[in-house]
Image (spheres, grey):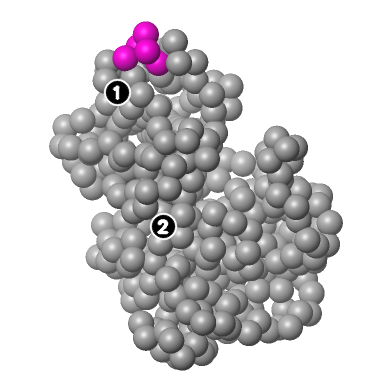
Amino acid sequence: MKAIQIHEAGGPEVLHYDEVPTPDIGPGEVLVRVRAVGLNPPDWYLREGMKVMPPEMRPALDFPLIPGTDMSGVVEAVAPDVREFAAGDEVFGMLRFPGFDGRTYAEYVAAPASDLAHKPAGVDHVRAAGAPMALLTAWQYLIDLGHDVPSPFTGRVHQPAPLTPGMTVLVNGAAGGVGHFAVQLAKWKGARVIAVASGRHEDFLRTLGADEVIDYTKARAVDVVDDVDLVIDAVGGPDSSSLLTVLKHGGTMLPVFFAEYAPEETTKLGVSVSNIQVRSNGPQLAEIGRLLDDGTLQVGVDSTYPLSEAAAAHARAARGHIQGKIVLTVAS
C-alpha cells in the first residue's frame, strides 16, 4: 500500500509518499480502507521530533514512522473477536491516542475496534475524518470526560463545567479545529457564545451559532469582555493568562494547549483552571455521530489535499488562520 512516512524529524519536506506493507490485524482490531485523514497538531509535533516538549519528556522515536490519528474509511476485515463491526461498514475514529501509533496517513490501517464508531450516513468521509480529535477534545472538556485518567499537565482529573442555558462562554481561537466545535457545543447547551477570531471568519462563526464575534486584529477580548462563566482557549501562548481577567468570580478557564497560570493570580481572581489530554473513545464518537448526522454539529473544512501531497497540507497548517480542519483524501 501507499503511505506517508517520516524518515527523520524536520519540516514538511520530510513527509515521503512510500510503498509499505499493508498492516496485519490482531485481536480486537479491524482493517480499514482509509478514505480520508484529518490533520491535527500532534501530527506536526511528531514530524518535528516532538521538540514542542521539554527534552526530558520527549518520547524516543523509531524512524521511519507513519503519522496520523484521525481517519474515516470502510472496514475490509475484522478479527474473530470483533462483533460490533463487519466488512463493508463505514467507520471513523481517532486511533491509539494519546500516543503516536495511529498510522492513519495510509491507504489501510489496523484500527482498535474500541476507537471506532459507525460513520454518520449523512456525513461524507472528508468531514468525518475532520471530526475525531478536535471534536473529542471539545466534548471531553465540555460534555463528558469519559475516563478517570489524570491530566499529565496538572496531575488532576478534569471535571467538565456544566453548560447551562444563559451562561456566557468565550472561545478563543474559535475558527480552528477545537474552537469551532466548542462554539457549537456551547450553543447546543444554550450558552451565549462569544467567539474570538480573525474578522474574516465572522460569517462562518455566526453560522455555527456564535452570538458575538470579536476580531482580535481590531480589539483585545480582555478590553471589551467581562463577566464570562467559561473560557475555552484554543490558542495558548504567553497571552493565555490574560484571559483569566474576563472571567467572573467562580469562572473556569479551559486551556487546550498547556500553559502555566500563577496560583496566586487564580486564587486572587477566584477562578479555576482545568486541562485534559484527549483520549480515544469509540462510544463517545458514536454519540457525537448522531449529532453530526442530524445537523446539530457541523464540520468546517478549510482545505483538502491528496494523501500524496501531505507535505503541502502540513505547509498549509504552518501558515495558520485555519477555518475548520485540513483533510487528506485517499482515492477509493
For badge 2, the amino acid type reads Val
Q: Helix or strand or loop: what does disc 1 sit on?
A: strand
Find the magenta span and give its range: 266-270
Name the residue located 73 percent from the left edge and 38 percent from the top edge. 56
Horizontal relation, residue 66 to residue 155: left or right:
right
Answer above or below: position of 300 versus 329. above
Question: Of residues 59 and 52, which is closer to you in this image?
Answer: 59
For badge 1, the amino acid type reads Gly
Q: Is residue 267 magenta?
A: yes
Secondary structure of the magenta portion, mostly?
helix
Answer above or below: position of 54 versus 177. above
Q: Indicate the position of residue 193 as horizontal and vertical percent values.
A: 29, 34
10 Å crowding of disc 2: few (<14), some (14-19), many (20+): many
Q: Helix or strand or loop: what does disc 2 sit on?
A: loop
Name the residue located 70 percent from the left edge and 66 percent from the top edge. 66
Name the residue located 30 percent from the left edge and 40 percent from the top edge. 160
10 Å crowding of disc 1: few (<14), some (14-19), many (20+): many
Q: Is residue 174 visible?
A: no
Q: Indicate the position of residue 186 as horizontal and vertical percent values.
A: 28, 41
Answer above or below: position of 295 versus 203. below
Q: Is residue 90 visible?
A: yes
Name the residue located 61 percent from the left edge and 80 percent from the top edge. 108
Q: Is residue 139 magenta?
A: no
> Which is more N-terminal, label 2 or label 1?
1
Q: Give the farthest residue toward the left.
A: 165
Horizontal relation, residue 312 to residue 221: left or right:
right
Q: Which label belongs to residue 179?
A: none
Horizontal relation, residue 98 to residue 127: left or right:
right
Q: Which residue is mark 2?
A: 299
